[in-house]
Image (cartoon, rainbow, N blue to C red):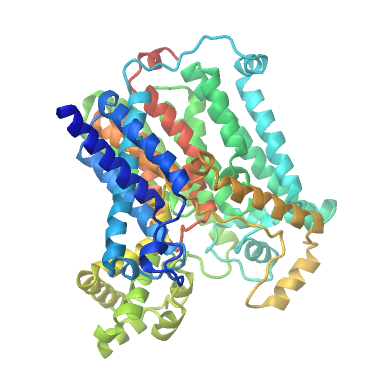
Amino acid sequence: MIIKKKNVIVYIKSILVTIGLMVSFDYINSQNSFFTSLLENSPFVYAIVFIFLSRYFKYAHSKLNYPTVYYQKIISILFAFGTWFTSIYSPGIPSIMNVVRSPIGAIYSCIYIYTWFVICENLQKIMAHTFFDKQFSFKNNEKTFKLSVVFERYPFMFSFSLLMFFWSLVALSAYPGVFMGDSMDQVMQYYGYFNMKAGHPVASTIITGWFVRLGNLISTGSFGIFLFTLFQVMIFSLIFAYSLSWIFKITKNRKYTLMLLIIIMILPSINGVIILTTKDILFSAFFLMFTLQLALLLMGENKYINDLLYMASVLGMMLFRYNTKYFLFFSLIVYLCIFILNKKVRKTYFKIIGITVLTLFLGNMINGYLVNTYVIEQPQPNRREILSLPFQQTARFINYHENELTQNDKKIINNVLDYDKIKENYNPRLADPVKRTHDEEATRDEMLAYFKLWWKLIKLHPVTAIEATMANHSTLLNIDKSKNQYYENGVRMDHDYLAERYEQAYDELGLTDKSISLKLNQVRVTIYRVIDRLPFLSQLNNYGFHLFLIFVFLGYSIRNKNVKLLSLLLPIIFLVMTLVAGPVTDGYLRYLLPIIVVTPVAMTFTVISKRQELENY
């Protein structure tokens, strides 16, 4: 009787999860009925899914003896809701209320959220069973194919050569390069078309300009952009190869390291992004180096070269992204607490804290020198850059609850933001149209009054505040379909303002596109989008899934009271928090590249964190 009862539970769970996987909000605005438009009609496929799930849940009930604790369940709930929010906003539905106000929509939403909660829970159990079990070991002495033997002898050179070759082909197909919104602004600031500002890291502006100048000395500005693209590819290849050589040294497993190498090489979210002309690429490379060196320091690696590489990575991050000091500051607070409370690790954390603070001080000095030497206008980054979150929530309050605002409330908002413009230009998925209206000259009292009103509105309408944030950033917590956005353009882009001046700069600096490259870009992006729809590859290419893995590792570190693993993961978590405070993450891979590239290091360190073989690497 007990067995039958368990089978009934398994079948009910299988039915609910199958229905949840069938639910789609893409056609909710179609002419079909609300009931049928929420279900994708693929009965044969989902019949197979049901059979698989019923068998899997029976197996999991008896074999996966790893019940998750409450904070691991919070992780599953968080990503289940994130996936649900993304599935609603992606087809253009403005609010979750459009779905849940209908009883059918509310029921299907509950089933959908339950489905992804179950999936997240079982993914955590599978990883715990596979990687964190006491019997698991990376060591593998089996004979394998000859190429892996070459890798074993020369892991760094093998990895570097393969990555550099493949990624250079990708870069060549996009000759001379791929610009995004800020790329040409930085080039024009370097050449004096615009006054140089500190809105972009000055080091990034100077280096980009240097390569354009070098290209014009040799041939054309386009050739300079291609050289800069190859420079980024080389830096990434070197740091990834160095990371993989350390992973192999620690794990002593050829197959595992080669698998990571192949995945890193072919993932569109990496090779399609490192060819962008933007500060975020070199920052991501330095962030990878920082994470690896931090792991080595936590493992007790005390070589002088590792200390230098750690300092160089922190310095590199500071020169290419201003938010570096924020996520490092919060990390240092936690490290200081560990230093005070845990006597056993004081020596390690004293060293980490000391060299981090020293490098932060050095980085501030260098950034200050660059600003004083080169910046003509706006010597500090705009205040608006860290206020996207409250500004976007304010815009949504106006659009959904304007009738509750008094004339005084509107005046308070208008002192900080252009009330009429943000009401008209509010874009749920992008904060730039709202934050651009911010008055940087707003006084301290005006800002204080604004924040008091903002907090009052949050308490009155918490769901609206959550929706404003999730519309911007829910894809961070989405583990279903990838929402990646790719660039098909070359170096020339359309500009809404000062178009003639941009065209003049393009012509005078010799920045032109090749028609064959633009066609190849379209082919390449088409392949990327196909990969984003393939099983397994789509998840590997989804930054939300990478972040899910990071949170799973975080839950594991808390559960096992692994302070060193927690210390490695915290800078990643704090970096994500700074991104949430920014204008957008929805599909913007250049912002999420750091999370993707550090996952192999974080995963390896998590798996070996309880292994005896760590002591003998």
Q: Residue at x 26, y 36 (%)?
A: 10
Q: How many marks?
A: 0
- Does 263 sit left or right of 146 as displayed? left
- Does 431 sit left or right of 349 as displayed? right
Q: Residue at x 56, y 66 (%)?
A: 197
Displayed quadrant of residue 354: top left
Residue 141 in percent (x, y) is at 52, 9
Q: Residue furthest left?
A: 1
Q: Residue furthest right?
A: 219
The vertical placement of 409 against 611, above or below, is: below
Return the residue nearer the eye: 569 or 385.
569
Return the residue nearer the eye: 309 or 534.
534
Residue 255 in percent (x, y) is at 54, 20
Q: Residue at x 71, y 75 (%)?
A: 501
The vertical placement of 72 against 36, above or below, is: above
Displayed quadrant of residue 531: top right
Residue 230 in percent (x, y) is at 71, 43
The vertical placement of 194 against 23, above or below, is: below
Q: Quadrant of the N terminus?
A: top left
The vertical placement of 502 against 311, above or below, is: below
Return the residue nearer the eye: 483 or 229.
483
Q: Quadrant of the C terminus?
A: top left
Residue 532 in percent (x, y) is at 55, 47
- Does 604 sit left or right of 400 as displayed? right
Return the residue nearer the eye: 333 or 507.
507
Q: Is residue 273 visible?
A: no
Q: Residue at x 31, y 58 (%)?
A: 109
Q: Residue furthest bottom?
A: 407
Q: Is residue 258 visible?
A: yes
